[in-house]
Amino acid sequence: MKYKLENENDLIRIDKFLIDKLDLSRSKVQEMIKQDLVFVNNKKVKNSYILRINDEVEVVGELKIETDVLPEKMDLDVVYEDDYLMVINKPSGLVVHPAAGHFSGTLVNGLLAHAKNLSSNNGEVRPGIVHRIDKDTSGLLVVAKDDKTHEALSRQLKDKTLSRIYVALVKGRINHDTGTIDAPIGRDPYDRKKMCVTDENSKEAITHFKVLERYKNASLIECKLETGRTHQIRVHMNYINHPIINDPVYGPKGKTTPFGQMLHAKEIGFIHPVTKEYMNFKCDVPEEFNKIVEKYKEE
């Protein structure tokens, strides 16, 4: 991976530059530099190196992190399974894959105990994971058992033929029946743990939505992703002043419960990489989701 420095806005510390480009934490980027995985003009540099016009930045190899991701028996809700892939209904509160310092109790640990084989495309920390959904988002995701299946599903994600539809409860009444939010998303410069709509170091993000029901102080909506950015629906709905209810990060402060954001991946559709059959799966929202919706209906 190479970058040629031609923009004056990029003349910053090498570690800050790579945080935005690679979408990694500062500690991971600094560890990459320490492991001699980053070169500027074919030379090793320190984290504090300030980039200059015409510098050539090259990232070689992957960060080597000592991991111990072990299988853990877990009561997985397997919606579909064959020799090549699985479709899982993930409960709210379950982290999809391990991260530094946290290698147990994730969906991946459960998958390792459930399946004999998982794809290796995303490394040993994210085996089988083609795409992810947030910890406190519930619903469907597809898991690949081999690398060819993973590659084929990833291509469908990229060319937008893998369909993902969500249902969400958002704050306020949305008066128009449908809408499209086309606003680029990048890392929040003031809070590295958050994403935001921004023109700087961002990627295209498009969310389509339609209103299913309106209540006095909320709207139940359906969202279809055209792109798949981190926290995309949560960021986009907050951007148009209709944040997802119960969202502890992008919603109103101090008004959340342990259940997490009212966002559920209710439907997923794709072409099976081997049989070439179009497959579509749906799952109902969790019981707790319905209980919260009922409260807003009664207001």
Image (cartoon, rainbow, N blue to C red):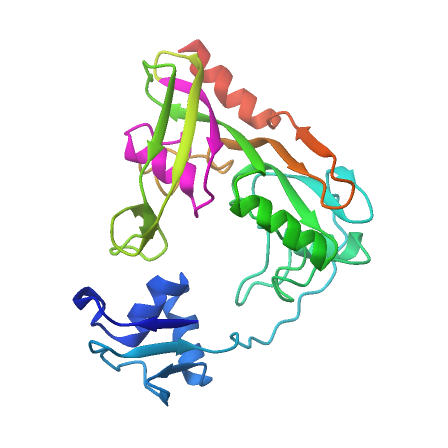
Taking the spot 37% from the left edge, 43% from the top edge, the residue there is: 249
Left or right, 144 with reference to 201? right
Taking the spot 39% from the left edge, 40% from the top edge, the residue there is: 248
Left or right, 104 with reference to 259? right
Q: Height in image: 92 above or below 66?
A: above
In percent of width and height, residue 130 lies at 61, 51
- The answer to whether residue 89 is seen in the rendering is yes
Taking the spot 52% from the left edge, 30% from the top edge, the residue there is: 166
Quadrant in which the C terminus appears: top left
In percent of width and height, residue 208 lies at 42, 28
- The answer to whether residue 94 is seen in the rendering is no
In percent of width and height, residue 28 lies at 43, 71
Taking the spot 32% from the left edge, 44% from the top edge, the residue there is: 184
Within the image, what quadrant is residue 170 found in? top left
In percent of width and height, residue 259 lies at 51, 35
Quadrant in which the N terminus appears: bottom left
Of 266 and 192, nearer the camera is 266
Query: Residue farthest to the bottom?
Result: 43
Of 169 and 63, nearer the camera is 63
| Count of marks overlaid on the render | 0
Is 237 colored magenta in this rendering? yes
Left or right, 45 with reference to 221? left
Q: Height in image: 141 above or below 35?
A: above
Is 87 colored magenta in this rendering? no
Boundaries of the magenta span: 218-246
Of 195 and 201, nearer the camera is 201
Q: Height in image: 243 above or below 24?
A: above
